[in-house]
Structure formats: structure tokens, C-alpha cells
Image (cartoon, rainbow, N blue to C red):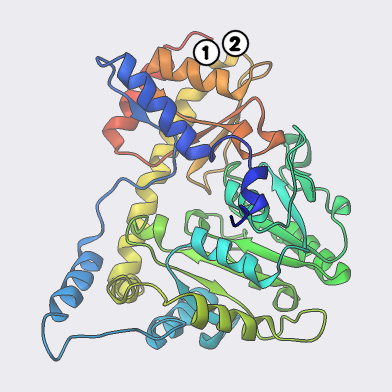
Amino acid sequence: MIKRNTGFTHLTAGYLFPEVARRRREYAKNHPEASIISLGVGNTTEPLPKFIAKAMADYAIGLSTAEGYSGYGDDCGNAELRRKIAETFYNGMADADEIFVADGAKCDIARLQTLFGSKVQIAVQDPAYPVYVDGSVIVGAAGKNNGKGYKGVTYMPCTPENNFFPDLSVVKKNSLIYFCSPNNPTGCASTREELVRLVDFANKNGCIIIFDAAYREFIRDDNLPKTIFEIAGARTCAIEINSFSKPAGFTGVRLGWSVVPKDLKFADGTSVNADWTRVQTTLFNCASNIAQAGGLACLEPEGLSAMKEVIDYYLENVRLIHKTLEGENFKKAGVQIYSTGNSPYLWVKFPGMKSWDVFDLILDKCNVVTTPGSGFGPAGESFIRFSSFGHHADVEEACRRLANLSL
């Protein structure tokens, strides 16, 4: 018989979010009277802006006509959409032929690993979005977990002590560095000075940065960079990943993009852009034409305005949760809140407690689902991630319950 990919045998437990969902289902089964509210998984909850939804509906209806029917789309994305992404988000920092349309950021991050193979060295922020590590394990770029992390992965602790920006000196030369800003789960958005250090380090040490900017539209501080390409030198060391999931509510529609500069080269001088084009044309048929019609609508003035309103809605939830966590019951327990208002997440430390224990406590006493920080990496232990994705009424009710939590 054909042998199993050993990468799968090295994975530990289940993927974080299905495990959260499993525990929620189990609790609901045993407590059918409970009215459970989720402040856990980062899934959007608000309806699509009507202007954007109508664009997709009109395109879908058009497919039933001879004039409006379309078959396969362009392999790397609708040319007009690529141009508008370049103009809207990069304004001269990236060209249209460096933009590649995808079916979401997570999918792109997984596909990108085919560019580098199983021998590449991996470095990740700790804590980090699980797909960076789990995907690396599956393709063979990381080995077994020794209880403190996976063999072959360099963990870069991001803690309150270093303002959630890691010590880059632990990273080996010629590594693939996964970096997310605003960060999931810590919510921290890196400063310009910090990203300059990151880019300079990568260029000096032959590293490539996979820069996950999926939460860029939550940044409200004009002094914070929204793209790695605002930093001089990034075009020779970075790939950026982004998505319409959070600002437009496209978590189920599935639409994102990557930016791969033509200046970025492998050690042998081959263009990374050229190889990524080959991946797109060989292993992928791009995102749905209907979703791309929605993406074009997002980038119209009315669509941009609607997306800003959606983000403002979730940021108001951040404010409500933050205020609740400042309550006397949390202060007495020494709970520490980390949130700058430039992310949908609040990263909250419960000193002396295990993350899953806090998760179970909040679920049992408040019927509120959160996300345990330890699921994002070793440095996440004792932390809980609170998500702002939810209806205002649900968030307000969750806050009322949390305000009475005894710790």
C-alpha cells in the first residue's frame, strides 16, 4: 500500500478552531438550556453590504444569458480587479502583474508553501495563526512536536515584555518568516520602526517574509503601516497576503490576493513571481468569477465606504468588550488586557491559569465561547483571545454575563 504523508502523523491534536467548535457542541449537548454566544472564532457576522451583494447577484444572473456567460476566468485573476487592487491598496508600491487573486488568505498561505518545498527553514511569531505551522508540518518543512513546539520551526516569542515584536536574532539565515500585522491573535499592529527592522533583517540574512495583512483595514492609527511595501527594501524580501474576508464579510464568499514583487528572487536568481505564476496556472483556477465581481464592487467608492462602516461596527464591539474586561472582578484577578483598537481581537492574560481552563470556565459560567491562547503557540499559554465579530446585541449580552464572572 502507498504510505501516508508523514507530515500528517506529526500533527498534534486537532486544528484549534475545530477543537473549539467540538467543545462548544459538547457543552450545548449537555446543557440544552444554555444560550451560547461566541466571542471566539474570527468569523464575520454582519450582512454583506447591499451594493457589493448586488454586484455578485447581477453577475450570477448574467451567467444565464448568452451575453453575460463566462467560463474559466483569467488564471491569476480578473485583469481589472488586479489593477484596482494595485491602485487602491498599493498606489505605486506594486504593479497589477504582481497582484494574484485567490480564494482567501488562508488558502494562499497554504499554497505558497509549494514554492519553498520541505527543506526550507521556518520561523513564526509565537503565538501565531495555526496554518503557518500546521501547513509547514504537512509539507514536511517541520517535524514532530516535542511538547514545546515542532522540530525545525523557530518560534519568535511575542510577549508584553517585548511589545509583541520578536527578537529576530533567534531566526536562522535563509528562513521563511511568517509575520502577521495587525497580528492574529495578539491584535498588535507593528510600528514603522519595527517593520524596518524586520525588512532590514530579512534582506541581510537571505530570508523571505510572508506578511499576512488580512486585518489591515482595522488600522485606524495613521502612523501605523498598512502594508509591508511601505517599508524601503520590502520588494526584495517580502510577499504580502490579504483578503476581503473581514472588511467585506467575504469569509464564505472567499476572495483574497497575494502580492509577489518581481524584484523578489530565489537563491539561484529565479523570479519568485514567475514560479508563483506557474503555481497559479497549474494548481489553481483562481477565485470564482462571481466573487471577483464582488471584489470589483468593493473597490468602488460606495463599496469602500460600506467596508469602512463594517469595520467600524466591529471596532465598537472591541470597545465594549475592553470596557467590560476592565471591571473590578477582572482587576482583582490581575487580568491584563492588550488591545490598541487597531484590530478585531483583544489578547487577555489570566495570570496563573491555563488557557483551556479559562476557556472552560467562561463557557460554563457565562455561556460565552472564546479562543484559548495556547492553541496559537507556546507563548499563548494563560491568554485568551476575545473576538469582536458578532452582532452588537449579542456582544452586549456577553459583556453583561462577563461582568458577573467570578474568577
Q: CA distance from mark 1 to mark 2?
A: 6 Å
- Can you identify the residue that label 1 sits on? 328
Q: For the residue labelled by badge 1, is the local secondary structure a helix, a strand or a loop?
A: helix
Q: In the drawing, does residue 203 fall left or right of residue 212? A: right
Which residue is most to the front?
A: 1
Whole-percent x and y of residue 196?
A: 77, 64
- Relative vertical location of residue 80 with respect to residue 366 in this rendering, above or below: below
Evaluate whether residue 399 shows in this view: no
Evaluate whether residue 58 shows in this view: yes
- Can you identify the residue that label 2 sits on? 332
The quarter of the image holding the N terminus is bottom right
At 11% from the left and 80% from the top, the residue drawn is: 64
At 36% from the left and 48% from the top, the residue drawn is: 44
The front one of 262 and 181 is 262
Contact between labelled residues 2 and 1, with CB atoms less than 8 Å apart: yes
Q: Amino acid at mark 2?
A: Lys
At 71% from the left and 85% from the top, the residue drawn is: 263
Examine the image and state in which quarter residue 221 appears: bottom right
